[in-house]
Amino acid sequence: MDMDTLRTLQTTDGVTLGYRVLRQSATPRQTLVLLHGMASNMTRWSEFIEQTTLKTGWDILCPDLRGHGASFTRRRLNLDCWCRDLLALLDTEGSDRAVLIGHSLGAQVAVHFAARYPARVHGLALIDPVFHAALRGTLRTANLMRPVIRALVSCIAVLNRLGLRRSRIPGRDLRKMDEATRAKLLRAGKQEEMVELYSSPWEDLKFFPVGSYLQELLEMIRPLPELARIPAPILALLSTGITYTDPQTTRALLAQNPRTRIVTIEAYHWPLTENPVQVREAIEQWCNELAIR
């Protein structure tokens, strides 16, 4: 049996969450949860799901985080609600424990969830997690401007309640975008153009509400729980051209958890786009080791 279905979940506060479930057995198995990044959606993981060997031995859940894709809402977004939503998802799908695999914002959600619900987490695979103490570049600037960003979020919320908002926001297939980027930019050696495209807020805002984007920016720079508090093993995939954080500080903070393994990926901050095979193979090897412990 091979089931790949799209499902929805109604939260206690009335938000509809969309997610993808991939199962090849009627009997519940170990669970992987794939968490996308900022202003992204579940299609970022489509290529991974199609190609990974893990689906033969694991159930895979791939949600759109609240505010994204099939889980669209203009309500308040923060790590607290994303963690509650993830708990509801695991409960709904009958998963007692899961391995959480998150990229960027998804990594932040995974760490916060593991700190709050350690008994529900078998392991964490973090792709370019963002530590507050390691901020640099755009995120460091955003941290300095937090009061301004919060004020903008409040103003936009008022305007939205008055009906001043876009009536329609188009969807985005990130797998198609990633494939086109590799074909047109990366294979032509145009890495700088790729970074400019993927790091541009103006490009993201074509497909994402401004208020939601700013709220996510605030959550990205929110301090993470100490990894020493998290009993689960951690796989950290760090881009060589790490864009938003200081690599030495990031490695030192990851080392707080003695069960952390660090793997370097040849990429900037979008390894699922830039180097999907290396990412997939590193995750598969680590998950297979977890499965036999």
Image (cartoon, grey):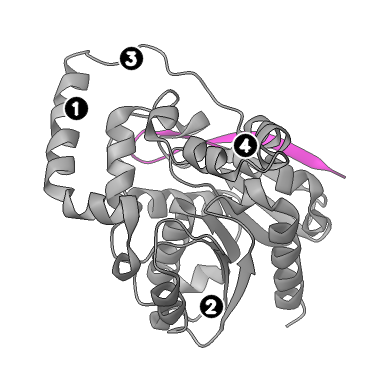
Q: Is residue 211 left or right of residue 97?
A: left
Q: CA distance from mark 3 to mark 1?
A: 12 Å
Q: Residues within 10 Å of mark 2 (few under 14, many from 20)?
A: many
**Disc number lying in front (2 or 3):** 3
> Marks 1 and 2, how far apart in space?
39 Å
Q: Amino acid at mark 3?
A: Arg
Q: Earlier in the sequence, mark 3 or mark 1?
A: 1
Q: What type of secondary structure mainly makes up the magenta span?
A: strand
C-alpha distance separating marks 1 and 4: 28 Å
Above or below: residue 104 compared with residue 230: above
Q: Which amino acid is tagged 4?
A: Thr
**Whether label 3 touches label 1, CB < 8 Å:** no
Give the secondary structure at mark 1.
Answer: helix
Out of 170 and 244, give the one closest to the viewer. 244
The disc at residue 32 is none
Q: Nearer the viewer, mark 1 or mark 2?
A: 1
Disc on the earlier residue, 1 or 2: 1
Q: Which residue is mark 3?
A: 166
Dot 2: what SS? loop
The residue that mark 2 highlights is 232
* Amino acid bearing label 1: Ile
**Tag count:** 4
Residue hosting label 4? 43
- At x 60% / y 64%, what residue is drawn? 98
Marks 4 and 2 sit apart, C-alpha to C-alpha, by: 27 Å
Identify the magenta region: 1-18
* Disc 1: which residue: 156
Q: Tell me if 60 is positioned left or right of 18 in this view.
A: right
Contact? badges 1 and 2 (CB < 8 Å): no
